[in-house]
Image (cartoon, grey):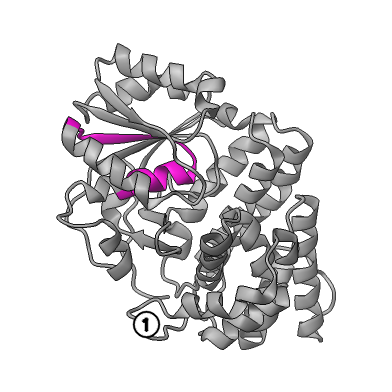
Amino acid sequence: MLNFDLYMPARIVFGRGTQSRIGELLKPHAKKVLLHYGGGSIKRTGLYDTVVKSLNDAGIPFVELGGVVPNPRLSLVHEGIELCRRENVDLILAVGGGSAIDSSKAIAMGVYYDGDVWDIYDTGKPIEKALPVAVVLTIPAAGSESSGDTVISNEETGRKYGYGSPKLRPLISVMNPELFFTLPKNQIANGVADMMSHIFERYFTNTTHVDLTDALCEATLRTILSNAPRLMEDPQDYDAWAEIGFAGTVAHNGLLGMGREQDWACHAMEHELSAAYDVAHGAGLAVLTPAWMKYVHKDNLDMFVQFAVNVMGVSKGFRDKEDVIREGIDRLQNFYRVMSLPQTLTELGIDESRHEEMAKKCTEIYFGEEYKVGGLKKLGWQDVLNIYTIAK
């Protein structure tokens, strides 16, 4: 087990009706709030009115900025930064899923930065200060409600970069599974694939003597595997949503990666798909993850056998490890199929014409120098190209 520093300050307020408490929860922390959200769904469902009433009842003035889209855009972040500065906002309330939260975090750190906030994403420079962020979660997927991570797309350059800092962990996150009842099935499936990938990126490691976090990863994955299909049958199953929502938080709050070398190759490869083709992040991960497994498993056969047996329930004999691993990957792909997730890049509308370009962008992200992605197996651009080819 490696050294680690575990810090998880995000307060999670969970359960029925909790969204109506957001005003009282923020009252000790905010004098003026930016209400940041996406399209019209929170207004159609009545959530917007509930949040506004709660803020008004608590006597908290606010300004608002809507328009967040999947793969949130830098241009809206710039707009939010200027609005916060002009209105003397001292807290950002994200109402939505990962995109709204990521956009809020970008605004939060950009308010105090003397320059273009994209510089922080581009260089990875540490931030000294950020506005606090709070969340009313409407889509469990990204885990951004409890993480210090944010991902933003730059429309001008066509790049999609992530950034992380403990200063970006939300102060308070409200999670009511009832708010997830109206999600369309494709968003349910994409969210499940995203949270599973957050676990895979931590789980598949060469680090040994990490029995506790191995078991925590496996239990969280099994919870998702057993509850997600229930939501495809009944999107208003409160108990299944409670399990899935909490699993998404645990998947990305940092706990499952403690003491382990992590991977993150699949996320790096998928960011290039999202940047170039604007595909749904979870859908891209569902395609790339099995392809990555097929390409890298020989570098740690025992880790993939453990996955096949402890997570996917493969029970055949262990004399042929390759056979056990193939069965585990097949079962994962079948689960994605049950969730109506795509199986190939072709299904996402992606042909081979930009594979090499995306592979080189994926690894040439630090000042034009090749940077090998991944932890379990270090991947150069040719490796990434091979994985795209497997996934085609």
Q: Position of residue 382 (x, y in %)?
A: 57, 87
- Residue 179 vertical placement versus 321 (above, below): above
User: Which residue occupies the extreme top position in the image?
Assistant: 57
Boundaries of the magenta span: 87-106
Is 199 displayed left or right of 370 in the figure? right
Q: Position of residue 154 (x, y in %)?
A: 40, 58
Q: Position of residue 252 (x, y in %)?
A: 47, 54
User: For the residue labelled by badge 1, is the local secondary structure a helix, a strand or a loop?
Assistant: loop
Which image quarter is the N terminus in?
Answer: bottom left
Q: Residues within 10 Å of mark 1 (few under 14, many from 20)?
A: few
Q: Is residue 305 visible?
A: no
Q: Is residue 213 visible?
A: yes
x 80%, y 52%: residue = 338
- Residue 143 vertical placement versus 237 (above, below): below
Q: Position of residue 49 (x, y in %)?
A: 44, 16
In depth, the one of 222 and 292 nearer the eye is 292
x 42%, y 80%: residue = 364
Is 365 displayed left or right of 351 in the figure? left
Amino acid residing under circle 1: Gly
x 55%, y 39%: residue = 139
Which image quarter is the C terminus in?
Answer: bottom right
The magenta stretch spans residue 91: yes
Is 114 displayed left or right of 200 in the figure? left
x 25%, y 35%: residue = 91
Q: Which residue is mark 1?
A: 368
The magenta stretch spans residue 178: no
In depth, the one of 10 and 59 nearer the eye is 59
